[in-house]
Amino acid sequence: MTDYLLIALALLGVLILGTVGLVAPKLRRRREPPLPTTEVETRAEEDLAGPPVEAAEAAEAEPPAGILVEPPPAPPVQVPEVPVEVPEPTAGRLVRLRSRLSRSQSVFGKGLLGLLSRDRLDEETWEEIEDSLITADVGIDSTREIVDRLRERTRVLGTRTVAELRALLAAELVNALDPELDRALHTAPKDGVPAVLLVVGVNGAGKTTTCGKVARVLVADGRSVILGAADTFRAAAADQLETWAGRVGAETVRGPEGADPASVAFDAVKRGIETGVDTVLVDTAGRLQNKVGLMDELGKVKRVVEKHGPIDETLLILDATTGQNGLEQARVFTEAVDVTGVALTKLDGTAKGGIVISVQRKLGIPVKLVGLGEGKDDLAPFDPAQFVDALLGAEAGSDA
């Protein structure tokens, strides 16, 4: 009995499982009602649909991964051209810059004329006049000569008006500056060889800047110029000189930092001969006049350059604010390289314009150029009469 019951239960279980197996597939195939379409689902369907035709074409145009493709060549960098400047003519430039001498005018102009126009020119007054000239760095010996001549002429001529006194003082100062000295810059080529102008000076005198201004003076006077950057101790000096040269369309010859200055100077003159320019301007390193080794090196530069021919001009750059110390500088440089002329800078910033007289009286070296400001064309050819007239001031007489 028990066996029959078990068999019946087994058959019932098989029947139930079979029924479930037939019904379940039908339930799975039954469609569920559609849900409302949302914006998110719409975007998802668009993503599944793939990119648009244009995007697909662009994708096909791209190279397959793993293949190196050279980028297109970069367009050339357009370097802006530096416009070539035309420096203003040097003729009459000193007259145009006369206002820059205002500090020195207070000594030479109003000060001296005020003393000379006193009702009574006694011994004390003449001593004050001497002190004023010495303070202006005219020099002791030059001052005594000027004052002695003024005393004699005012006594003999009986001069009393301010205009007459101004004329007397101007004549004595011009005479002290020795107007017969040759002040021309010798920059004309000879026999197919350019003139060579060697620029020397101490550290801090503004030598490289003045060298660039000298180049502008030469260009303004119609000379073609090459600049030699023989100051190889400072890379900035060569860069600075190159900037000055570029402004007037001149070429610069330079060497690597630390190169032999004599070699660079030699190459500059050689380049000048090859290109047929009028003048080669060689800038040398600043050096203290008491450094024997550096002064010997300067002599070497001169000797090496002279293998091409004689140096036409050796220009010493002097800072007017150094006063009487400038005389010692000039003396040592003259012994080393035979200085032929002086460019006196920063006259606009000092009341010691009398250093011009001291340099010439002591050394017999003419002042050929004077710097009267920081502007690029503030370097002027020196003319004794114009210089004295500017020092005394046009209205000095009326103010005295």
Image (cartoon, helix red, strand yellow):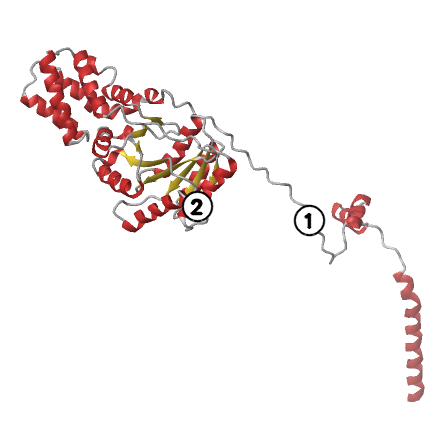
The residue depicted at 20 percent of the width and 20 percent of the height is 109
Picture quarter with the C terminus:
top left
Please report contact status of discs 1 and 2: CB closer than 8 Å, yes or no. Answer: no
Q: Which residue is under mark 1? A: 71
Q: Is residue 64 above or below residue 302?
A: below
**Cα distance, mark 1 to mark 2?**
42 Å
**Would residue 173 appear left or right of 249 to someone viewing this image?**
left
Picture quarter with the N terminus:
bottom right
Quadrant of residue 231 within the rendered picture: top left
**Would residue 22 appear left or right of 125 to someone viewing this image?**
right
Q: Residue 225's spot in the image, x, y percent?
A: 46, 33
- Three-letter amino acid code at disc 2? Val
Q: Nearer the viewer, residue 282 or 70?
A: 282
Residue 176 shows in the view: yes
The residue depicted at 31 percent of the width and 42 percent of the height is 337
Q: Residue 25's spot in the image, x, y percent?
A: 91, 64
Q: Which residue is under mark 2? A: 264
**Would residue 254 appear left or right of 133 to someone viewing this image?**
right
Q: Residue 166's spot in the image, x, y percent?
A: 19, 15
Q: Residues within 10 Å of mark 2 (few under 14, many from 20)?
A: many
Check disc 1 and report its element: helix, strand or loop.
Answer: loop
The residue depicted at 10 percent of the width and 19 percent of the height is 151
Residue at the far front: name it. 191
- Which-is-in-front pick, marks 1 and 2? 2
Q: Residue 94's spot in the image, x, y percent?
A: 33, 22
- Three-letter amino acid code at disc 1? Pro
Residue 118 shows in the view: no
Quadrant of residue 165 within the rendered picture: top left
Check disc 2 and report its element: helix, strand or loop.
Answer: helix
Q: Give the number of the disc on residue 158.
A: none
